[in-house]
Amino acid sequence: MGKSILITGGARSGKSTLAERMTLALGRPAIYIATAQAHDTEMSDRIAQHQSRRDADWRTVEAPRDLIGALRETDGTAPRLVDCLTLWLTNLMLADEDWQAATDALAAELARQSAPILFVTNEVGAGIVPENALARAFRDAAGLVNQRIADACDELWFCVAGHPLKVKPA
């Protein structure tokens, strides 16, 4: 099994930058598996900002929902960075797909992968309780996805204010 790492934290906590550095430290070139979809100008700008940090050492694979397919397609080629699980979850929920089954399948797939995988995810449960049912369902689902993938990963990191803390193994 290849090394698997989950990096979590709040918005603008430094998790993606950390994940990019850690991925390249495992080998070059690297593969960036993007789950984001640009449905509006603001999201297009966010995607462009992430793309601007990556140079020729990166190849991008877009996988808004078929994350397992992307992992299987790229296994054995280079270290992979999946950014991010919470956008993947959003895409699954909006498509009315079974995110719980998809999460279980993703966790099981990690044991079959030979090349390293780093995942970025958002810690969304540390803030206020959302006012609407969909936002509360998403917050709860994200917490469960993060727990399931953290259990399956070899390492877990938490970023706060640009500083990483290693959580697992302690």
Image (cartoon, rainbow, N blue to C red):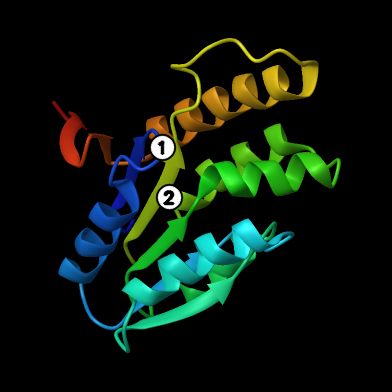
Distance from the alpha carbon under mark 2 to that under mark 1: 8 Å
Q: Which amino acid does label 2 sit on?
A: Ala
Which residue is at the front of the view, 116 or 113? 116
For the residue pair 6 and 129, the one nearer the viewer reads as: 129
Mark 2 vs 1: CB contact within 8 A: yes
In the rendered image, the vertical position of residue 130 relative to residue 31, given as above or below = above
Q: Is residue 20 visible?
A: yes
Q: Residue 111 carries which label?
A: 2
Report whether 160 appears left or right of 8.
left
In the shown orientation, is residue 30 left or right of residue 61? left
Residue at coordinates 67% horizontally, 63% vertically from top-left? 41
- Identified at 52% across, 51% down, the residue is 109
For mark 1, give the secondary structure: helix
Crowd band around label 1 with a 10 angstrom C-alpha radius: few (<14), some (14–19), many (20+): many
Q: What element does badge 2 sit on? A: loop
In the picture of the structure, the residue carrying the numbered disc 1 is 152
Pick whichever, 157 or 18, lies toward us. 18
Residue at position x 53%, y 46% in the image: 85
Instruction: Give the mark nearer the N terminus: 2 vs 1.
Output: 2
Q: Quadrant of residue 45?
A: bottom right
Instruction: Please tell me the numbered disc located at residue 160.
Output: none
Q: Nearer the viewer, mark 2 or mark 1?
A: 1
Residue 67 position in % (x across, y down): 60, 59
